Amino acid sequence: MEDFDIRKDEAKTDAHAPRTDATAQPTEGKETEHVEALDEKLAEMTGRWKRALAEAENARKRAELARVEGRDHGVALAIEALAPGFDALALGIEAARSGPDAKDERVAQHLEGLERIRACFETAMKALGVRIIAPGDAGFDPAHHEAIDTRVEDGVEAGRVLVLHRPGYAIGQRLIRPARVTVSAAPERQEG
């Protein structure tokens, strides 16, 4: 029995001792190579995942930009189509205000109704993001104004908007139509 106990103790010692035989080292080398291969594969997959995530975000941004541009284009087309009616409404209001019957109660009621219609148009345009370009005593801006006439005005520096003939419209950075204006000019120098 003693012989059995000695072998049992040797077996316990051998189990806890590091293996030094020829078969232990190649297994550890293979495991290290396998771990390194897995690390490389993980790094590759992580890189692919990051690129795919960036591409998806870029695609989302492009789609959002296209949606906004498409919406703005549609609004611009609608405003272009409705602008002549809005212009006619403004001319009708101005004519009713300055006409000989402006004090008549019925004309005043019609004028009030026309003003409400114009206010509704303006509110709707603001809700759509449309800016009305109606310069009053502002500097002439060729990017937003179309000068259809010039005239010299005493006491007014050159390049100021004197008269608004027709308002313009813009949405975002897009000009739908320029405002038509008369601009002050510098007095002509007399040679003498």
Image (spheres, grey):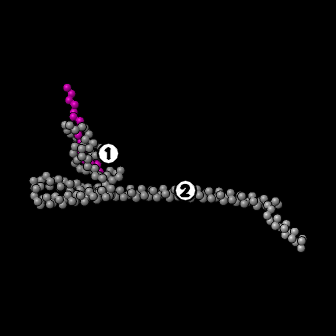
Q: Earlier in the sequence, mark 2 or mark 1?
A: 2
Whole-percent x and y of residue 57? 49, 57
Q: Residue at x 54, y 58 (%)?
A: 52
**Amino acid residing under circle 1:** Ala
Query: How many residues crowd around disc 1 within 10 Å: few (fewer than 14), some, or many (20 or more)?
Result: few
Q: Residue at x 26, y 57 (%)?
A: 122
**Amino acid residing under circle 2:** Arg
Which quadrant would residue 81 be assigned to in this image?
bottom left
Whole-percent x and y of residue 146? 27, 45
User: Nearer the viewer's eye, disc 2 or disc 1?
Assistant: 2
Which quadrant would residue 191 be assigned to in this image?
top left
List the residue tagged with mark 1.
143
- Taking depth in this image into account, of 7 and 62 the one nearest to the observer is 7
Residue 187 on the magenta segment: yes
Q: In this image, 23 relative to 35: left or right?
A: right
Q: Residue at x 89, y 71 (%)?
A: 2
Query: How many residues crowd around disc 2 within 10 Å: few (fewer than 14), some, or many (20 or more)?
Result: few
List the residue tagged with mark 2.
51
Q: Which SS class for mark 1?
A: loop
- Taking depth in this image into account, of 69 and 12 the one nearest to the observer is 12
State whether residue 87 appears in this view: yes
Question: Label 2, label 1: how many angstroms apart (C-alpha)?
Answer: 41 Å
Magenta residues span 177-192
Q: Which SS class for mark 2?
A: helix
Residue 167 on the magenta segment: no
Q: Residue at x 76, y 61 (%)?
A: 27
Which quadrant would residue 149 be assigned to in this image?
top left
The quarter in which the C terminus is drawn is top left
Whole-percent x and y of residue 109? 14, 60
The quarter in which the N terminus is drawn is bottom right
Q: In this image, 127 relative to 101: left or right?
A: right
